[in-house]
Amino acid sequence: MKMRNLVLLAVLATLVALAGCSCKEYEEQIMALDAQVADLQQQLGEREATLAECNDLTDELRSNIRDAEMENAVLVEKANEVVIITMDETVQFASSQAIVLDTMVPALEAIASTLNNYPDWEIYVEGHTDSKKILEEFQERWPSNWELGAFRSAAVTRYLTNELGLGTDRFAVVSYGPFRPIADNDTVEGRNENRRVRLVLHKPEK
């Protein structure tokens, strides 16, 4: 809708500007307007195609996750042209750990089998932690939750690429540490929810 409004505004602005122009100037303005409208229409068409592909990707992810019997542990959401995958704390990470648990593997396999069909989509893997201080025996490896979050997102990325064959050039590894909690860090249940990895999928513009 916004793109169509831009096209209409461009037409109106040009018509106003054409008042008092010579025939030659009028023709040049019309040609420029035609090119601008064609470009805006192309952008609109590309966005509509991406939205349709986003819907297909979301539906396929949900279907494959359901087939893997992981629908109660994996949430797939769509926001405009972005798909967000969040895995429940029951298949996530133990405190101060960055190991991909066996409980997470069926979900990752379902995700990878879907993404193989959408090779143009890129994946941001976000690592999140609870707010508890890193245990002393792990501090040499992870001085803070920033590093732990990065290790968690990297562990998921390595599994998706090394074990499940997705292209490494599609991934970005991100750590938010404890700074984007979704639950109360003062409770055990809340901390369990905050130890998570999210996959954010998007198709870059051409």
Image (cartoon, grey):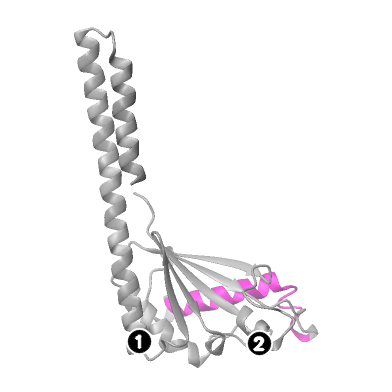
Q: CA distance from mark 1 to mark 2?
A: 25 Å
Query: In the picture shown, does residue 176 fall above or below 13?
Result: below
Dot 2 amino acid type: Glu
145 and 181: which one is in front?
Answer: 181
Q: Position of residue 47 (x, y in %)?
A: 31, 51
**Disc 1 target residue:** 66
Q: Residue at x 36, y 89 (%)?
A: 68
Q: Residue at x 29, y 46 (%)?
A: 44
Number of marks drawn? 2
123 and 29: which one is in front?
Answer: 29
- Range covered by the magenta-colored residues: 137-160
Dot 1 amino acid type: Arg
Checking the image for residue 148, the label placed there is none
**Disc 2 target residue:** 189
Image quarter for residue 71?
Answer: bottom left
43 and 157: which one is in front?
Answer: 43
Mark 1 element type? helix
Q: Position of residue 91 (x, y in %)?
A: 52, 88
Image quarter for residue 122?
Answer: bottom left
Image quarter for residue 134?
Answer: bottom right
